[in-house]
Amino acid sequence: MKSKRHAKIREIIRNQPVDTQEELQQLLQQEGFMVTQATVSRDIKELRLIKALDANGGYRYSTVKLESDTVFTKFNSLFADAVLNVEPAMNIVVVKCLSGMAQAVCAAMDAMNFEKIIGTLAGEDTFFCVTKDEAKAVDLVIELKKLMSR
């Protein structure tokens, strides 16, 4: 059922502009998929959908069509250039960035789908990565500090 729903989501966003999770949920329900907003949110993350600028100046869901090597290279470069410090705080990783860069780095990190991260929250110069436990937070910090030194 999930694979059919994912295929339908790809079809929907390919054929019409969809700019909110609620709109996608309604369109899926019209197609016979009785889903919750939480399910739609998970599907968006699993399908790695992003909001991209359309021809009318609005934003709509779209698929990422970049090769993984290119994505990793761009992420690594952005992370190394914009991040100043990474520290664990219980099951949260605090990432300090250059002013104005936290949201961009956080969004790029979300697109990378790090297994250790269950959610993120970004501000102007700081963002948080929530992990399931302290051990995963420490592992993530080690991984991210390696990216900073490149």
Image (cartoon, rainbow, N blue to C red):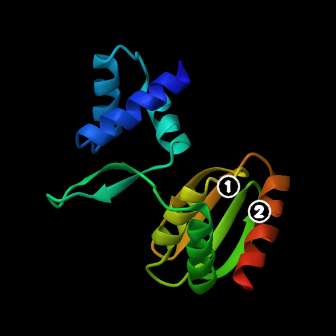
Residue at the extreme front: 67
Q: Amino acid at mark 1?
A: Phe
| Alpha carbon separation for disc pair 2 and 1 | 9 Å
The residue sitting at 46% across, 56% down in the picture is 65
Q: Quadrant of residue 89?
A: bottom right
Q: Residues within 10 Å of mark 1 (few under 14, many from 20)?
A: few
| Mark 2 or 1: the one toward you | 1
Frontmost residue, 64 versus 30:
64
Question: Where residue 137 sits: x, y (%)?
Answer: 77, 58
User: Does residue 71 appear left or right of residue 10 in this picture?
Assistant: right
Residue at the extreme left: 56
**Under tag 2, what secondary structure?**
helix
Q: Amino acid at mark 2?
A: Leu
User: Does residue 32 appear left or right of residue 128 in this picture?
Assistant: left
Q: Which residue is mark 2?
A: 140
Question: Where residue 36 sits: x, y (%)?
Answer: 43, 23
Frontmost residue, 72 versus 89:
72
Query: Disc number at residue 38?
Result: none
Mark 2 in CB contact with mark 1 (< 8 angstroms):
yes
Q: Which residue is mark 1?
A: 114
Residue at the extreme right: 135
The residue sitting at 75% across, 85% down in the picture is 149
Q: Quadrant of residue 81?
A: bottom right
